[in-house]
Amino acid sequence: MFMGTEGTFEFDLTEFWQWVRKQHPDMGEIQYGVPRVNKANWTLEIDFAASTDGHPQDWAKKPKAVLQWEELK
């Protein structure tokens, strides 16, 4: 038993996004949103936008997967 222990788990981002891409079917150009925790159902959620006709960052109406990153700036 460990009492009073705390720390931080770190995940290599390159490996994390490679894993995400392996879980997701090939849908052309894809933009993933900012990962977040859903405390209600204990899941990690990542929004995405995909297109075979150009990158979602170039869409006239920006999808939330793009906007989430812009909000972090």
Image (cartoon, helix red, strand yellow):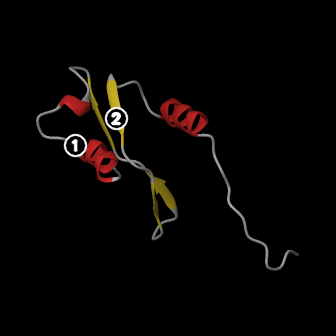
Which residue occupies 51% across, 37% down?
20
Q: Residue furthest right?
A: 1
- The residue closer to the viewer here, 65 or 41, is 65
Q: Amino acid at mark 2?
A: Gln
Q: Position of residue 48 (x, y in %)?
A: 33, 41
Which residue occupies 28% across, 42% down?
66
When asked about the image quadrant of residue 40, the answer is: bottom left
- The residue closer to the viewer here, 73 or 48, is 73
* Left or right, residue 25 beside residue 3: left
Q: Secondary structure at mark 2?
A: strand
When asked about the image quadrant of residue 58, the answer is: top left
- Counting residues from the start of the chain, the first of labels 2 and 1 encountered is 2
* Left or right, residue 40 beside residue 50: right
Instruction: Please tell me whether residue 1 is drawn above or below residue 62 in the rendered image.
Output: below
Mark 2 is surrounded, within 10 Å at the Cα level, by few (under 14), some (14 to 19) or many (20 or more) other residues, namely some
Q: Amino acid at mark 1?
A: Pro
Q: Residue furthest bottom?
A: 3
Which residue occupies 22% across, 43% down?
63
Q: Residue furthest front?
A: 73
Q: Secondary structure at mark 1?
A: loop
Pointers 2 and 1 in contact (C-beta within 8 Å) = yes
Q: Position of residue 71 (x, y in %)?
A: 29, 53
Q: Distance between the Cα atoms at labels 2 and 1?
A: 9 Å
Q: Quadrant of the N terminus?
A: bottom right
Q: Which residue is mark 2?
A: 31
Mark 1 is surrounded, within 10 Å at the Cα level, by few (under 14), some (14 to 19) or many (20 or more) other residues, namely some
Instruction: Please tell me whether residue 41 is drawn above or below residue 35 in the rendered image.
Output: below
Q: Position of residue 14 (x, y in %)?
A: 57, 33
Q: Which mark is residue 63?
A: 1
When asked about the image quadrant of residue 32, the answer is: top left
